[in-house]
Image: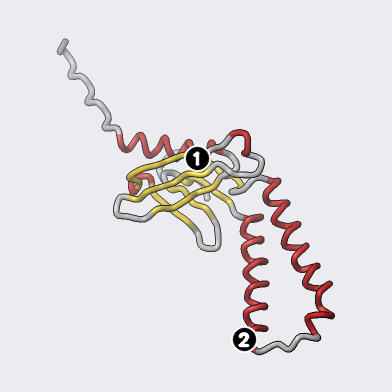
Amino acid sequence: MTGESDGSNASPLESAAFPPLLRTLAVVLVVDLFAFALWSLPSLRTTSWSATSLFVFGVAGLCVAWVGYWIVYSRTRLEGDVLVQTWLWDKRVRAEDVAQLKLVHIRMLERVIAPRLLVRRRFGGITWFHAYDPQVLVAFGQQVAQRAVPSAPAPEAGTQ
């Protein structure tokens, strides 16, 4: 992507969605859960399992791995006037579709809790966007504010 969707030559702002400490913690937890499952395998084999319980156990393991993957690899970027976050499903919102924004940022906990933006759309719907670098979210907020505030008309020549 070249960032030219709005006619500007600036490259898109991009950030990891979650802080490095949280991403590391997600990897450690997923690895620990699977190590614990392997360690428990001898006692799990002695239990009688139904097909349904095996299926649920397998799906739970896949869900843990899938969410852990997206915590580590999720990215948030501002492309022109569109804010996009890759997640289990990609979240996307255009500045012109925003009715209300709320930036949630707890400075003392930013190593664990990523700054996030609550976006209310004009025609309903609420979406949370996370970004380790709050400048991505602030830049999107500025784009929304520019659209919300009408520009003043230029004074006519020769009038005082």
* Direction from residue 153 to residue 62 in the image, left or right: right
What residue did someone put label 1 on? Answer: 104
Q: Identify the residue at image location x=73%, y=89%.
A: 48
Depth order, front residue of 159/66: 66
**For residue 68, above or below residue 51:** above
Marks 1 and 2, Cα distance to the nearest angstrom? 41 Å
Q: Position of residue 34 (x, y in %)?
A: 76, 68
Amino acid marked by disc 1: Val
Which quarter of the picture shows residue 32?
bottom right
Depth order, front residue of 1/112: 112
Residue 130 got which mark?
Answer: none
Residue 52 got which mark?
Answer: 2
The residue furthest left is 159
Q: Residues within 10 Å of mark 2 (few under 14, many from 20)?
A: few
Question: Mark 1 or 2, which is nearer the eye?
Answer: 2
Depth order, front residue of 39/5: 39
Image quadrant holding the C terminus, namely: top left
Q: Position of residue 100 (x, y in %)?
A: 36, 43
Q: Position of residue 14 (x, y in %)?
A: 56, 44
Which quarter of the picture shows residue 67?
bottom right
Q: Identify the residue at image location x=43%, y=48%.
A: 82
